[in-house]
Amino acid sequence: MTTTMNTTIVNKNMRTGFHLNDLNPGLAGGRDVHIVDLTISYHRAGLSVTPISGLDLYAPASRVTALVGRSGSGKTSVLSCVAGMLRPQSGAIWLGGIEVNTLKGKALDEYRRHHVGVVHQAYNLIPSLSAIENVTVPLSLIGVPRFEATARANDLLEELEMTPFARRKPHELSGGQQQRIAVARALATNPSVVLADEPTAHLDGSSVSDVTELLRSIARSGRTVIVSTHDDRLLQAADQTVHLAGSSLG
Amino acid sequence: MIKIALRDLQWRSRRVLIAVIGSSLVLALALVMSGLSAGFNNESSRTVGLARATSWVIDSGGTGPFLQPKPLGVDVVDAIVGQVGENHAAPITFGRQSVHRTDGSTVGAHEHVNLVGAIPHRLGSPFVTSGKALAATGQAVADVSLGVGLGEQIRLGSSEFTVVGIVKGARLLAGVPNVYVTLGDAQLMAFGGQNLATTVVVDREVSPPAGTKLLSNAEATTDGLRPVVNAQKTIAMVRSLLWLVAALIVGSVMYLGVLERTKDVAVLKGMGARSSALAGSMMVQSALLCIAAAILGVVLSMLIAPIFPLSAEIPRSALLLLPILAMTIGAIASLGAAKRLFSVQPALAFRN
């Protein structure tokens, strides 16, 4: 049993500005994310849950797209599918010319490594690694030599004004600082799309505006930014807002 | 991935240290168990070796030269000696005898010794490591483990002897020291002075006379091990259990590590890290933990072994093999953790 999704797309004016980072050469078909007739189902506690049913969504490059909706509305599930971490029941997800939902094995690993950067709600930094080591992890996964990876991570931390905290472990950093490290990690491989799951959930007021501006800067660099959020302040910074409603249990 | 594995070990250093100490203690005990078992084998083969024989002639109704040997008459002994000459065959006796100092006090912790009667300067009479070889009645050559010095008087049964020589490692029947006296002295104590022997040792080929049989050194060694066969089996079982405990310690540390790091594993998979690479880094952790435990285990075994009342002769091969064996056990024990690691879904990274 499924319910129909109530989806609204609100476009806002496009913003341009400085490039936070250089981007990889363009993907065939651009960096837009295009979701067609997406249905996501999974089992939890013996129940079949369908948080997303028949979702169509277009998230253009250089824009911040915000996903909003109550808890359980499927915001995180959509992000997981775009990240290639969750396989949808049906439908298609395109990043430029890549049909994400059909990727498997090494191709899926390559997609996750090169094309997607994720900023998690709880930051999810590796606790045993220092800030700069956390940023170099995705670079080492794509085979960047250690020296080069460290230089790249240093550049990112400098741009995010985190250089003084480079050697600190995550537990020695504030929430806002951890969030910046998480952003630096997400950007390390110059991904085409950056996904942020409730990026302001654990932040105070000033940190929220910092993260908001940061996400806008990332979008201005030509990337596609998709954010799930409850935060009105973040919504105001989004170029378009997608309202997700309801889930069904079976 | 290796760097992450090393950093994780540092991050969980206290827990890792406890696991290393725990498993090293278990491995040390396993080594000592191996040493005890090897000690039994070695003492029997050394006792056989000290006779400098290649074959042992015993009564055909006996199992060997050491356990309840049946006496051979002088005619049998003469028949054998007659075949190869006195230089290549000699009668000996083997039995148990009480031991005391001349003032009646016990000699260390020993109340009994293995009494070997041999003709001086012939097969069966051992070369000594210090002092003089057995030469005359009233003299004794004792194993160093008896704890008596050269020139000391000891009482075997009701007879007094002077210790003139010391041998090393001449023990039998689970650490009981051997004491060598002349055949005549031994016959006096064991057979009331009758000219009997329990074995004829030879270093040439002989045809055993009727009513006797020929045993090789290996068979004689096995006879010396008969009383400790069950002890060795028990030791082998305890050793297996100790290996199992060590594996459980390493395995549980690795499994708990994966459980605690489920989110990290999901995040890394979400970044495109392959499960096989993550499992590989976990195996590196397991190997490092096991190597550290093995090295510490070797050191601990050296400290623990001398405390045991029985001689634990840890084979060098066991010391060298321990790290490899420990790593193998650690890898097997970590399979559960690896299975868990493979099952972690990257989407878990999004859960809070």
Image (cartoon, helix red, strand yellow):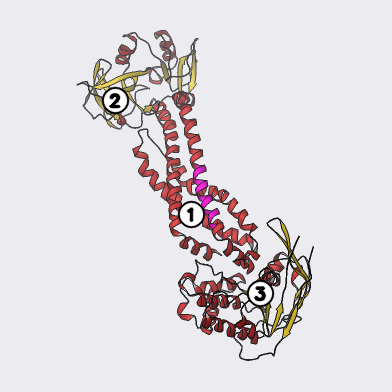
- Same chain letter for marks 3 and 2: no
Task: Point out the image quarter for the C terminus of chain B.
Answer: bottom right
Quadrant in the picture for residue A186: bottom right
Question: Which residue occupies 53% across, 67% down?
Answer: A126
**Magenta stretch mostly in which secondary structure?**
helix
Element under disc 3: helix
Residue located beneath label 2 in the image: B141
Residue located beneath label 1 in the image: B289
Density class for disc 1 (Cα within 10 Å; few <14, some 14-19, many ≥20) is many
- How far from the left and from the top, in percent, is residue A216? 62, 85
* Amino acid type at mark 3: His
Question: Which residue occupies 44% across, 48% down?
Answer: B22
Density class for disc 2 (Cα within 10 Å; few <14, some 14-19, many ≥20) is many
Mark 2–mark 1 contact, CB under 8 Å?
Answer: no
Residue located beneath label 3 in the image: A114
Quadrant in the picture for residue B36: top left
For this view, does B146 lie left or right of residue A25? Answer: left
Say the numbered circle drawn on residue A102.
none
Q: Earlier in the sequence, mark 2 or mark 1?
A: 2
The stretch drawn in magenta includes residue B333: no
Q: Is residue A124 above or below residue B61?
A: below
Element under disc 1: helix
